[in-house]
Image (spheres, rainbow, N blue to C red):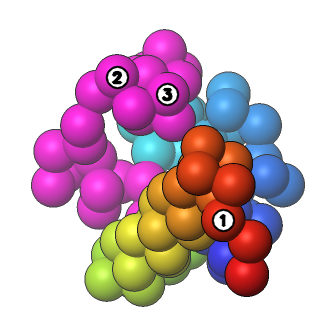
């Protein structure tokens, strides 16, 4: 996705600086151990030069893709 591609080009350090969010918080968001507030969504989308609605949509698409792959892996389902 576009969000993922942009994110990969930035280091967590740079992203945390631009989004004004601690690196450890970004790591926790990636791991799913914390949920972002609306402020964090806006800060991250701005740092990634994306509109917040586009950012959220892209994240949701990645989550669905991950869930689908996980279902295939755990249930042996192939497309």
The image quadrant of residue 21 is top left
Task: Give the distance between the C-alpha atoms of the residues marked 2 and 1, in whole angstroms.
Answer: 28 Å
SS category of the residue bearing label 1: loop
Between 18 and 36, the one lying in front of the other is 36
- Which is nearer the N-term, disc 3 or disc 1? 3
Left/right placement of residue 19 relative to residue 52 reads right
Residue interval drawn in magenta = 21-47
Query: Outermost residue toward the left?
Result: 38
- Residue where numbered disc 2 is placed: 33
Q: Are marks 2 and 1 in contact (CB under 8 Å)?
A: no
Residue 36 horizontal side relative to residue 48, left or right: left
- Residue at (84%, 55%) from the top-left corner? 9
**Residue ID for mark 1:** 77
Residue 55 visible in the picture: no
Give percent across and percent down for residue 28. Answer: 43, 22
In percent of the image, x 67 and y 27: which residue is there? Answer: 13
Residue of label 3: 31
Q: Which mark is residue 45?
A: none
Crowding at mark 1 (Cα within 10 Å: few <14, some 14-19, many 20+) = few
Which residue sits at x=34%, y=22%? Answer: 33
Q: Does residue 8 appear anywhere in the picture? A: yes
Question: Which label's residue is closer to the chain start, 2 or 1?
Answer: 2
Is disc 3 in contact with disc 2, using a CB cutoff of under 8 Å?
Answer: yes
């Amino acid at each position: 996705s576009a969000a993922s591609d942009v994110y990969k080009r930035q280091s967590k350090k740079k992203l945390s600086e631009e989004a004004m969010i601690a690196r450890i918080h970004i790591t926790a968001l990636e791991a799913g151990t914390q949920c972002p507030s609306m402020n964090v969504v806006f800060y991250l989308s701005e740092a990634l030069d994306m509109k917040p609605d586009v950012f959220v949509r892209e994240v949701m698409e990645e989550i669905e893709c991950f869930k689908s792959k996980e279902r295939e892996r755990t249930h042996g389902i192939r497309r």
